[in-house]
Amino acid sequence: MHPFARARERTRALNAVKMERMFAKPFVDALEGHIDAVEVLARQPNSLTTIASGSWDGGIILHNLSTRKKLLTLQQAHKGKVSGLCFADGDRLLSCGVDRNVKLWSIGSDASDQPLNIFPGKAAFNSIDHHRSEPLFATASNLVQIWDETKSAPISNLTFPTSTETITSVRFNLSEHSVLASIGSDRTFTLYDIRTGKAERRVVMQFRSNSLSWSPIYPTTMLLASEDHNLYTFDIRHLSTPSQIYKAHVAAVMSCDWSPTGQEFVSGGWDRTVRIWKEGQGHSPEVYHTKRMQRVSSSIFSGDARFVITGSDDGNVRIWKAKASEKLGIVTARERAAIEYRESLKNRWKMDREVNKVTRTRHLPKPVYQASKLKRTMLEARRVKEERRRKHTRAGETKPKAERKKVVITEQT
């Protein structure tokens, strides 16, 4: 072995991470068309390119990601904002809004600006999700309702006996199709079974959740985006504590979505940033931002896990690369070999101080940086205060409580 082999390899690793940061240009394009804030995004399950977006202006637009063109525009699909979108079997789209209607649209070759069917409700709808195999869909309003596509009224109402909250989001499990999860405005997270027609378990948390997403590869893992700036993953078999806490946002987290690989997920926040997290790693996520992007209200992964799509208050749907420095287009065999070699170098030298520093460093907008600095100071002050309080109390009277144990207040069955 050459005496300078390790030194040369370290220099190459350092150059590799520096090049990665130099070529990190994640923004791909902005899809325009909405005249108000984009509230909701949905990905077509069997397509890599088709996504739908719904806005506060009541309009729905169907986009093609590869051509970046509009496939279908439904102006004034709802009166008031579109609060939920999901794709049904075949070329059909379900939408719901605050006008108390659920509408079924055709988006195939026979697409029209008139809905195929309208399902009237008694309260404003906040969310909608379609069953994976049957012609059923669930809506969230002041209670969770299950609807059949062939009937104009809900076939069952799901509610917890003591519950009076407004349901803000509802999602079917991707594996166990009859299991349904919802989050409510009274800080609750509830699991239902549509076979029994009742709520099975309910958890009351410290803060309310804004979004939820089921993991595509772990059927029992659920991701929650919370008002307290954090994201939590729960194993639904053990709801007393979250399995992981993800901390980096400096304002409420408004949306979250798993990558189809289940290895990472995206979150969008009130702090005007989009963050991409590795599953199980609760800190140092990839962070995306632009000068014009306002508060991010919805974020999803594309079907091939290579792109992230976000909708924000400024009315734009933005496309980002999931890996900021990834080259788009044709990659030759020689380039592929060089990329893989650089990846292996970065992985081998990731514990080196300088390599690690370059890998982790992200430039943030000044308001976000200042807010995170202030947040760190406040959390440190709180920790010191608790430590001093414990120090001046009788021995054994107060025990430090783990951060994960503070999240859930109570579990009800």
Image: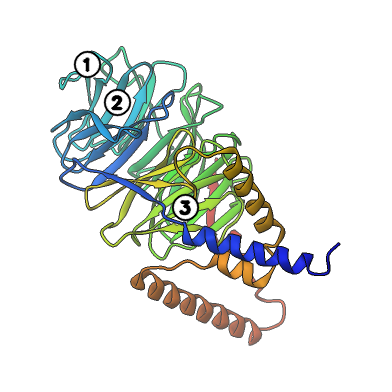
Say left or right for 20 vs 297.
Answer: right
For marks 3 and 2 on the same chain, the one whose residue lies earlier in the sequence = 2
For marks 1 and 2 on the same chain, the one whose residue lies earlier in the sequence = 2
Going 22% across and 31% down the picture, which residue do you hit? 122
Choose between 322 and 57: the one closer to the eye.
322
What residue did someone put label 2 on? 94
Give the vertical position of 318 relative to 368 (above or below).
above
Find residue 77 and report its image quarter: top left
Going by the numbered disc 1, the residue's amino acid type is: Leu
Going 83% across and 69% down the picture, which residue do you hit? 3
What secondary structure is marked by label 3?
loop
What residue did someone put label 1 on? 116
Give the vertical position of 131 relative to 186 (above or below).
above
Report the disc number at residue 345.
Answer: none
What residue did someone put label 3 on? 324
Cα gap from disc 3 to disc 2, whole angstroms: 33 Å
For marks 3 and 1 on the same chain, the one whose residue lies earlier in the sequence = 1
What secondary structure is marked by label 2?
strand
Find residue 341 and report its horizontal and vertical position in percent. 66, 50
Find residue 59 and report its horizontal and vertical position in percent. 18, 35
| Residue 162 appears anywhere in the view | no
Q: Nearer the viewer, mark 3 or mark 1?
A: 3
